[in-house]
Amino acid sequence: MTLGYRTTDGSIVTLKPIAAQSTPLGDAPALKLSGREYAAMSTGRVLRAAQAHFDYPAPDGDGAVRAGAKTVAADELGALMARKRFAVFEDGESGLLRLAYRELVLRFRADSTRAQQAQLLKTLGLSKRSGNAFHAQQFVVVDAARRYSVEALIELALQLGEQALVEFATPNFISQYTRCASSAPPSPAKAQWHLAMVRARQAWALSQGRKSITVAVLDDGVDVDHPELKARLKRKPDPQEPRDLLGRDFYVPDSAADHFDPRPKRFRMPFDQMNGNDIHGSCCAGVAVGSGPRGFGMAPRCSLLPVKIFHADDLASDARVADAVRYAAQFADVISCSWGGPRSPDLQAAIADASTQGRAGRGAVIVCAAGNDAAPRVSYPAADAHCIAVGASTDARLQADYSNSGAQLAVVAPSSGGAKGIFCTDVALPGRGFNIGSVAAGGADGLFTNDFGGTSSATPLVAGLAALMLSLKPQLSPAQVAALLKRSAVKIGPPGSYDANGHSKAYGHGMVDALKTLQAVKALKP
């Protein structure tokens, strides 16, 4: 039996099972994965994901084991873990980890009735666990009676996708997502050379951005107390929700106490490394909208909406990532995504809806990182037709050697990979961030770093430029923004890099030029 899931374009992505054996180890559970080169690293992520999302047993401070709200004695642990069986897979398209349990995400067609939905679920032995705050016909359904194995439930999702009542069905995966900052350490940079390279200061004579235009940064959290970010925050984004003061955390449930706190929360030594630390999103936010005077963003007068979707590099729920996109599209004009992950029909649908129905019907502009795998393919979601895929170029105006290539690449923007890195805001908490308090790393106060990079940095620069474009002409559609960015890009790299249509798999349509882009926007006829 070949396992897989159906995407919104009808293609099937295969899933390769990974053997996972759970055993008690003293008073705490242990998990062993096999068949992967980095099984030891993956094991910790998988166990943390199961504890976070599946009520899997976790060590309690009193030496017992806690599963959800229940304390379990160590000698009962084996039986409990056997009942709470989940499955681990390698995604056949992205190679990333995916976990499945007893749940499916199911979207019914708009013309289906509640009675028809109930009858279908009753026939299959499934029940609705929760609705979706952003789509009335979408539900998480659960195999409460444990009628199916995980593999059988995945097969059922494929069959459900062919039902007349169903728009899509997919396992409620918990997935591995990768943040796209480069791990190559650059030389210290003393100035924001990347802004000079794209002629940002000249462009600011036309617009520094409008407060009414908002960039949502979907990432591992944004330091909302940073002195060069807090002035840019979009306050009370959702007027219908009094608890929503400055963004949300979609990694945790809506009912969690800190759902309305998008700050960085997870830190683990060493604190200047991305593994185990929420230190990525604050840098992305600064590159997009940092207010200066030390770490200017591309759009220093636009607003910022922090949307937390990750806790460091722990696996995340596809459904929650998709809902974060839906939330951002309601209250932001531009969505910046400096990460990649496996495809999901739920995320595909959320991106399609955001780009067509977001921004009060004009469509949100979605800007995504092409990825840092030095691969001849663009990562997802950057490869989605509704997104603007951004690659990285260096201070030498060449493709960064880590930057992914492909037909979907729209443009590149300056980042690390040459002699210089990107200077931008960092986590302001003492001893946390890429710079934990070094003059050479960006300043003794630790508020800024000069070693940010990767397509992670290139992406928010382009997102900020899109915000400047909308500041001049808010009526522009996402397609118009993408077309203007491509048309105004400058050709860099070897002369033979571009085809007859002016596109290069390594450089897209070229490197963005802020002045040229805003001049083109200003010249548009009403």
Image (spheres, rainbow, N blue to C red):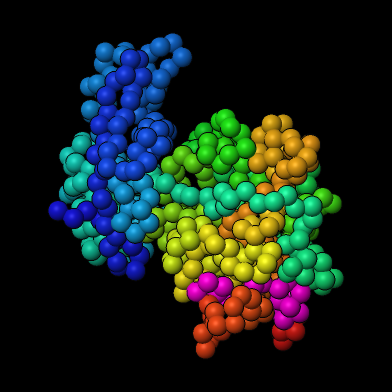
Query: Residue, x 60% and y 46% (percent of image)?
Result: 280
In the displayed structure, would residue 352 be above or below residue 526?
A: above
Q: Which residues are magenta?
A: 505-521
Q: Position of residue 134 (x, y in %)?
A: 48, 54
Q: Position of residue 12 (x, y in %)?
A: 27, 63
219 on left or right of 11: right
Q: Is residue 269 visible?
A: yes
Q: Pick whichever, 406 or 38, lies toward us.
A: 38
Q: Is residue 519 magenta?
A: yes
Q: Position of residue 343 (x, y in %)?
A: 39, 58
Q: Is residue 236 visible?
A: no
Quarter that holds the C terminus: bottom right
In the displayed structure, would residue 392 be above or below residue 97?
A: below
71 on left or right of 270: left
Q: Residue furthest bottom?
A: 500
In the displayed structure, would residue 514 be above or below residue 91?
A: below
Query: Residue, x 29% and y 46% (percent of image)?
Result: 89
Query: Residue, x 30% and y 56% (percent of image)?
Result: 92
In the displayed structure, would residue 390 be above or below residue 407?
A: above
Query: Residue, x 48% and y 50% (percent of image)?
Result: 178
Q: Pick whichever, 418 or 343, lies toward us.
A: 418
Hey, which quadrant is residue 266 in on the image? top right
